[in-house]
């Protein structure tokens, strides 16, 4: 076996150094992605973990209603919830938000439940607006999510009860992660996955609210629409 020449030895050393540098760079990128995901996940857990007394109260009520529910269809569930809350003395409404087409995304509409919690000792007597979404987690689901994004989705509650501030914080964390997931799996990033579009579902300035006056406790079909007004004029 012949000895290795000086030029050949130099090339081997260069190849080794380049290979080591590439591996180090790859590890650095992977480590950076993991750190970013961990930061997002911990921030999300922190946001979800902060619950006001009002949020805890409404969550408990909804849980009680659902435990006693005889099988209300999803189509009527929001109306049913509004009536149950109003029967218990809460200022609850069904909100119907709409938004027009822009250069960024198409027009759309969405429905959710609003509860105004009033405490004369807090906020100068101004009601605290709670948003209730009975199908919250699914709004952020995408096809073929990465493991990191699925972990974030799994951390979300299926039923959301929270303030506008909490909702904005969740959207600001999830939407960039969603785009990252779609990009990594080679899928198109649609405009309706942007933070502005997602926020329009619950925070659109073009929002009407409807309250229902139940004739009895048995079902939504026996209720009647009571009034329609602009949703939360003191907020927008």
Image (tube, rainbow, N blue to C red):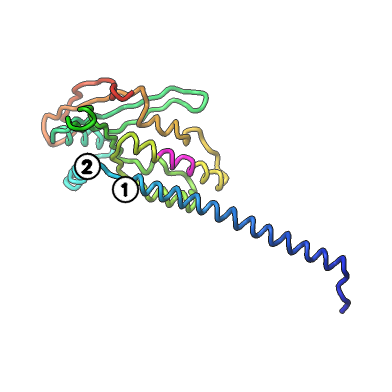
Give the image location of residue 50, x and y in percent: 30, 45
Query: SS class of the residue under badge 2?
Result: helix
Residue drawn at the location 50% of the way across and 49% of the way down: 36
Magenta stretch: dominant SS?
Answer: helix
Q: Which mark is residue 53?
A: 2
Question: Any magenta on residue 5?
Answer: no
Q: CA distance from mark 2 to mark 1?
A: 12 Å
Q: Nearer the viewer, residue 106 or 75?
A: 106
Quadrant position of residue 172: top left
Q: Quadrant of the C terminus?
A: top left
Q: Is residue 14 above or below residue 72?
A: below
- Looking at the image, which residue is at 54% across and 51% down? 33
User: Where's residue 123, x and y in %?
Assistant: 24, 30
**Quadrant where the N terminus is found in the figure:** bottom right
Q: Is 12 left or right of 162, judged from the image as shown? A: right
Q: Mark on residue 49?
A: 1
Q: Is residue 107 above or below residue 23?
A: above
Image: magenta residue range? 171-178
């Amino acid at each position: 076996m012949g000895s290795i020449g000086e030029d050949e030895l130099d090339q081997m050393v260069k190849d080794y150094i380049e290979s080591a540098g590439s591996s180090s760079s790859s590890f650095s990128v992977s480590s950076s992605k993991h750190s970013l995901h961990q930061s997002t996940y911990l921030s999300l857990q922190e946001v979800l973990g902060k619950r006001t007394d009002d949020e805890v109260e409404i969550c408990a009520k909804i849980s009680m209603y659902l435990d006693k529910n005889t099988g209300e269809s999803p189509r009527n569930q929001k109306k049913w919830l509004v009536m149950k809350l109003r029967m218990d003395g809460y200022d609850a409404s069904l909100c119907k938000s709409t938004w027009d087409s822009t250069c960024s995304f198409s027009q759309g509409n969405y429905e959710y439940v609003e509860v105004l919690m009033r405490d004369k000792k807090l906020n100068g007597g101004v009601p605290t607006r709670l948003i209730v979404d009975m199908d919250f987690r699914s709004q952020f689901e995408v096809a073929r999510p990465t493991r990191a994004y699925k972990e974030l989705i799994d951390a979300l509650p299926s039923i959301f009860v929270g303030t506008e501030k909490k909702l904005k914080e969740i959207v600001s964390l999830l939407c960039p992660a969603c785009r990252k997931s779609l990009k990594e799996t080679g899928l198109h990033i649609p405009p309706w996955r942007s933070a502005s579009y997602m926020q329009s579902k619950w925070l659109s300035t073009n929002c009407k609210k409807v309250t229902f006056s139940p004739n009895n406790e048995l079902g939504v079909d026996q209720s009647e629409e009571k009034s329609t007004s602009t949703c939360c004029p003191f907020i927008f």
